[in-house]
Amino acid sequence: MVSYLQIEGLTKSFGDRMLFEDVTFGVYEGDKIGIIARNGDGKSTFLNILTGREDYDSGRVVYRNGLRVGYLEQLPPMQEGMSALEYATPQPAPGHEENWNGADLARQMLTQFGIDDVNKPLQQLSGGQAKRVALAKVLLTEPDMLILDEPTNHLDIEMIEWLEAYLSRQRVTLLMVTHDRYFLDKVCSRIIEIDRHNIYSYDGNYDYYLQKRDERMEAMSAELAKVKNLLRTELEWMRRQPQARGSKAKYRIDNFYELENRSRVNLATRDVSLDVKSSYIGSKIFEAKNVSKAFGDKVILKDWSYTFARYEKVGIVGDNGAGKSTFIKLLLGELKPDSGSFDIGQTVRWGYYSQEGMTGFDERKKVIDAVREIAEEVRIDDKTRMTASAFLSKFLFTPEQQQKYIYKLSGGERRRLYLATVLMRQPNFLVLDEPTNDLDIMTLTVLEDYLVNFKGCVIVVSHDRFFLDRIVDHLFVFHGNGEVQDFPGDYSTYRHCVAQREKERKAEMAVAASRSAVSSSEDTASKNTWRQKEEKRKLSFKEKREMEQLEKDIESMTTEKGELEAALSSGNLDADAITASAKRLSELTDALDTAELRYLELLEIEG
């Protein structure tokens, strides 16, 4: 294995707060590593140290000589006055300035990334557009190693899936922080967790990590119980009269203090507590009647009608610019429709979590003061009320953190505070616009559990496919030009249906092309001599052998597919076998589709 990066004894703290201590691991050519940690545990700080943007207390960070490293920051800096094309265009290496086509390469990639106006100034780009331009800039440098900090934030699902496929098939070495669990599962072959100042490495994808992490926590709990039992015994010995242990070996005294230190490990996990109850919501929610909205030639909605039901949970998906955020603003009354109307029920109490975050807050205020301006006391349910400070503690803000100024909060801490201010008003209709940005996986899991059991209505705009799959009953798919499809199912089901339709379309096109070729061949033959009329397009020897082999392969793959499906539904497989079988079933399904399509093409020629 070729070593790209060696990290030895890396330690970083802020004052008396330790982020990580004595971290040691290596990154080797071809590694695709995902880093997981709770907000505030130092993920971005860790990446900033690796890229030389931040100092550290002790340790070593050593790269291979001559290694080209590309770094995508969570919020990439954008130089004012530059266009997207100027920003993304890579610089030529010394001695290669002549015939350099960097601008052409940048224009091609930006167009592929959906940036139609490559000369648009950077400051006029949306968050998603800016992230795509920054991503293009990094990829165009053709790095040996990529370091990515939350690469999926602000990207639409189509772009995320493109990046996912690109990173999966490229041989580039990768180290990234992301909360996108499907992305982690499909791209990464190694997961590193920062937990309680230490790191733990798992050679496998995200599913494998979850299984092994549970095993690790169980083992640590069992070990801690043993240590505490032994400590009790040693404590009795230590409490005896000094003369009773004066002749004892010094190692036993030292061992006691070591056990005492090991027993102080706290395995309890602090998670956000979202036990706020929604207010009552009546049977009438809202009804949209022939709503239309356009900005010039760009149509967002066209005669759209819908009656929202009680406790309904809807996901909104579509390309950037298709009108998702505009739809939410129409619903909340921030924009007026060109025609039609929204009829909102009297009991509806909105809770809006916007993509922009806490825009209405004075960042120079302390966390506790900003919350007290909303309410000194928070109503949890009919019987329970708590102070603003106690409520903030449920969102992992300690009394010390509540005294911090808002502008000093990390991205994840700001999102948690924002979520707290939305839920403390007891909404019964939540509208969430990209709620997963900057939240760690642990907080996302708690939020998902809360929304699944939420006794109210939910509309969520999200690029996080895992989040959508857990939360929503159906989807509003914005296709653009005013077309909104109501799809009855979660996102993965929708994507499967789209992929299946695409395969069927390609198969139909292949068959039509074969028929067209046969028809064209017959027309040509009718114009030739009688001898040529007798001649007919036949399979070549090679094609006959291919067809025979395809028949065997299709039969074999069909049998194996049936066996895999039976095994997966039996309930007898362990976690590793389930992961391996599911992966093989996916590969087999694709291979079978390809083989059957080719067999149909050959059959058309033969028949």
Image: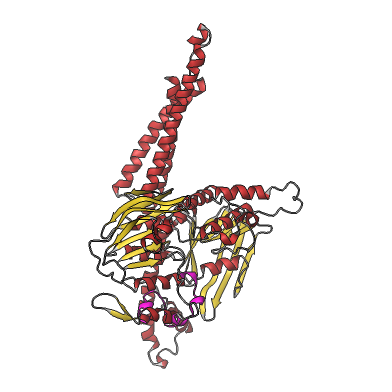
Most foreground residue, 201 or 115: 115
Residue at x-position 34% and y-position 74%: 424
User: On screen, 364 above or below 181?
Assistant: below
Q: Position of residue 444 (x, y in %)?
A: 40, 64
403 in the magenta segment: yes
Instruction: Kindly identify the residue that appears in the image at 56 percent across and 73 percent down.
Output: 11
Q: Is residue 269 visible?
A: no
Along the viewing direction, whichever of 375 and 251 lies nearer the viewer? 375
Q: Residue at x 44, y 20 (%)?
A: 606
The location of residue 152, given as percent across then percent down, is 49, 58
Of 546 and 470, nearer the camera is 470
Rendered-image quadrant of the C terminus: top left
Please name the colour scheme applied to the rendered image: secondary structure
Residue at far top of view: 530
Residue 303 seen in render: yes
Give the number of marks: 0
| Left or right: residue 453 compared with residue 161 | left
- Please state the horizontal and vertical placement of residue 297, each as a whole percent of the image: 48, 50
Q: Is 199 situated left or right of 565 in this image? A: right
Bounds of the magenta segment: 389-413
Query: Where in the figure is residue 344, as x and y percent of width and height?
Result: 29, 62
Q: Quadrant of residue 146?
A: bottom right
In the figure, is residue 532 to the left or right of 55? Answer: left
- 277 inside magenta stretch: no
Q: Residue at x 45, y 88 (%)?
A: 247
Decide: is 26 above or below 233: above
